[in-house]
Image (cartoon, rainbow, N blue to C red):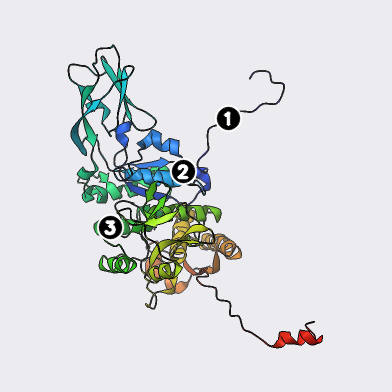
């Protein structure tokens, strides 16, 4: 280090995410990414990829503002470029394969000072110019703004040049690519790649989302099916959208939800889409961001609903871009049917709706499942117990070990109660739950009773006029 004497200032790179070690909620997004921008995209298809910042995303999966074609870019921007609280990490699973999902195309490029730009999602290795050799006569590379830069290396190109290339084509991506599965060789694709996250990163997936795809019922069904007992253990939340092109009104949204069976207990259903400046988001993306932000601010415990928390938007729109305005009363109508939306109140746009898709006002619902935070909190408990005591599997379970588990777990549960994150929690090792036939097989059950903390969905203050105050006019006790 050089000798210093004086006052100095220096610019450091923008830090646009929170430390991965400080965030417990892990969103997983399945969709399409512009991986053709990378020099080597061989390890970016049907694999879970951890993203910790906007620049990290550009380096690992590319970035393009065409979110309709590259749906994962919306999630990246929402998490790491929002104006409220950049938050990460996230996991992305890209199904778009430059070798498969492509279309042949041509374009005319004007060269200025021996270089020009191609504004298409071209696959670099496929770019060709007649009577010229890539790497000898010209070079191609992606710029930071997602365009292809073509350079004339030796002055042999005559402007304008006709460029032939293969470009990424989202229309070639099928619903089956997103749903994915496991082939005869054990290779996972699409949503089935969620199973690879824990073994790859040692992290538990807690939210599954596929904005741009989750409004398709068969994909929603696969997300919900995959969210239960991931790797035989982990339980996750699913955030999905109603098709806001088909459903253009509040009544239509309620009907669409019912007709398409978006009624699962661990499914948050969102409508309509939202805008922020010149960008358009699926509301499920914003709900996912808001959940991770809220959990982070609560020591990574999902006991608080993301409802009535700010989201970085400035309006609600339909799928065709049409503005749609409604007030809190109409938003509550959506909430009463288990649909989460967005409203403007107290100077901010907020996520609005503390329920999941199973909720319907007046319907007989397990009290545990009435609120999104209760559903998530119970899953948080099951996931946490498994992580805490996985190390004890296959070790001798004598009375001392039983007491150790009971004491350790109760201390942890008491801490959650003491912080108001649970109202009640008690763990026990009961004889009735552990018959001899089970114990000789090495199967043991610890019973946990808990009461989750309900949100104050409505606060009513009854104001009544009284004549008592008039006594003050005569110097009475209120004078």
Other residues around mark 2 within 10 Å, as few (<14) / some (14–19) / many (≥20): some
Quadrant where the N terminus lies?
Answer: top right
Other residues around mark 3 within 10 Å, as few (<14) / some (14–19) / many (≥20): some
> Which mark is in front, 3 or 2?
3
Residue sitting nearer the eye, 361 or 417: 361
Other residues around mark 1 within 10 Å, as few (<14) / some (14–19) / many (≥20): few
Query: Do callouts 3 and 2 mark residues in contact (Cβ within 8 Å)?
Result: no
* Label 3 element class: loop
348 w.r.t. 263: above or below: above
* Label 1 element class: loop
- Residue 81: assigned label: 2
Q: Position of residue 447 (x, y in %)?
A: 47, 68
- Residue 374: assigned label: none
Residue at 39% x, 30% y: name it.
144
Question: Mark 3 = which residue?
Answer: 245
**Mark closest to the chain's N terminus, 3 or 1:** 1
- Any part of residue 7 in sight: yes
Q: Is residue 66 left or right of residue 434?
A: left
> Which mark is in front, 3 or 1?
3
Q: Quadrant of residue 34?
A: top left
Q: Position of residue 115 (x, y in %)?
A: 32, 20
Query: Do callouts 1 and 2 mark residues in contact (Cβ within 8 Å)?
Result: no
Q: CA distance from mark 3 to mark 1?
A: 46 Å
Residue at 21% x, 35% y: name it.
99
**Mark closest to the chain's N terminus, 1 or 2:** 1
Extreme-front residue of the structure:
473
Q: Is residue 8 left or right of residue 124?
A: right
* Label 2 element class: loop
Question: Mark 1 = which residue?
Answer: 11
Residue at 46% x, 43% y: name it.
80
Q: Position of residue 354 (x, y in %)?
A: 45, 66
């Amino acid at each position: 280090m050089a000798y210093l004497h004086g006052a100095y200032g220096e610019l450091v790179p923008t830090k646009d995410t929170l430390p991965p070690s400080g965030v417990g909620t892990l969103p997983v997004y399945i969709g399409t990414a512009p991986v053709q921008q990378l020099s080597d995209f061989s390890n970016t298809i049907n694999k879970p990829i951890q993203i910790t910042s906007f620049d990290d995303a550009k380096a690992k999966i590319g970035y393009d503002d065409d979110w309709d074609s590259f749906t994962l870019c919306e999630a990246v921007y929402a998490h790491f470029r929002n104006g409220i609280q950049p938050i990460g990490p996230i996991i992305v699973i890209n199904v778009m394969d430059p070798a498969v999902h492509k279309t042949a195309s041509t374009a005319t490029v004007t060269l200025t000072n021996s270089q020009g730009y191609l504004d298409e999602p071209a696959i670099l290795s496929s770019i060709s110019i007649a009577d010229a050799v890539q790497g000898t006569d010209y070079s191609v590379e992606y710029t930071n703004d997602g365009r292809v830069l073509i350079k004339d290396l030796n002055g042999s190109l005559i402007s304008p040049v006709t460029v032939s290339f293969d470009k990424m084509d989202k229309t070639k991506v099928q619903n089956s690519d997103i749903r994915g599965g496991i082939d005869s060789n054990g290779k996972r694709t699409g949503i089935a790649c969620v199973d690879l996250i824990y073994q790859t990163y040692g992290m538990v997936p807690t939210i599954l989302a596929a904005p741009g795809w989750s409004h398709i019922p068969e994909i929603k069904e696969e997300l919900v099916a995959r969210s239960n007992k991931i790797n035989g253990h982990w339980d996750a939340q699913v955030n999905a959208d109603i098709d806001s092109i088909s459903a253009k009104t509040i009544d239509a949204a309620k009907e669409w939800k019912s007709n398409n069976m978006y009624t699962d207990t661990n499914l948050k259903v969102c409508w309509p889409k939202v805008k922020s400046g010149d960008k358009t988001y699926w509301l499920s993306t914003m709900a996912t961001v808001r959940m991770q932000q809220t959990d982070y601010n609560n020591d990574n415990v999902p006991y608080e609903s993301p409802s009535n928390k700010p989201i970085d938007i400035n309006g609600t729109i339909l799928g065709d871009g049409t503005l749609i305005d409604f007030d809190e009363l109409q938003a509550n109508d959506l909430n009463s049917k288990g649909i989460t939306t967005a409203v403007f109140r107290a100077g901010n746009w907020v996520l609005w709706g503390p329920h999941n898709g199973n909720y319907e006002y007046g319907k007989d619902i397990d009290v545990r499942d009435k609120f999104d935070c209760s559903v998530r909190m119970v899953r948080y408990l099951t996931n946490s117990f498994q992580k805490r005591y996985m190390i004890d599997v296959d070790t001798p379970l004598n009375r001392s070990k039983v007491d150790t588990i009971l004491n350790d777990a109760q201390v942890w549960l008491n801490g959650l109660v003491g912080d108001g994150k649970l109202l009640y929690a008690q763990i026990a090792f009961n004889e009735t739950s552990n018959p001899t036939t089970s114990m000789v097989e090495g199967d043991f059950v610890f019973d946990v009773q808990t009461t989750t903390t309900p949100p104050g969905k409505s606060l009513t203050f009854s104001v009544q006029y009284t004549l008592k105050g008039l006594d003050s006019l005569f110097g009475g006790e209120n004078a």
